[in-house]
Image: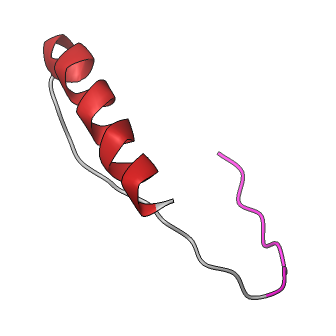
Amino acid sequence: MQFEQIVKPDQWILSQSFTVKVEEIPQVIGPTFMKLGGFI
């Protein structure tokens, strides 16, 4: 594992984190990206 520090100008960041079972990924990806797209 590699850690790196990057200095950039201030900017807005949108992130989402959750845990799902591998079998649930197809049901989660679509709606999650739609929600994120709504914020953008």
Number of callouts in the render? Answer: 0
Quadrant into which the N terminus falls: top right
The magenta span reads 1-9
In this view of the protein, which residue sits in the foreground, 29 or 8?
Answer: 29
Residue 40 lies in the magenta stretch: no
Q: Which corner quadrant of the image does residue 27 belong to?
A: top left
Picture coordinates of residue 5, whole percent (x, y) = 78, 72
Residue 6 lies in the magenta stretch: yes
Q: Residue at x 31, y 26 (%)?
A: 30
In this view of the protein, which residue sits in the foreground, 40 or 25?
Answer: 40
Q: Residue at x 25, y 34 (%)?
A: 31
Q: Residue at x 29, y 40 (%)?
A: 32
Indicate the colouring scheme: secondary structure
Picture coordinates of residue 26, whole percent (x, y) = 25, 15
23 up-or-down from 29: above or below: above
Instruction: Please identify the dominant SS of the magenta region.
Output: loop
Left or right position of 33 against 31:
right
In this view of the protein, which residue sits in the foreground, 19 or 33?
Answer: 33
30 up-or-down from 33: above or below: above
Picture coordinates of residue 29, whole percent (x, y) = 31, 28
Left or right position of 32 against 2:
left
Q: Which corner quadrant of the image does residue 13 belong to?
A: bottom right
Q: Residue at x 21, y 29 (%)?
A: 28
Residue sitting farthest toward the bottom: 10
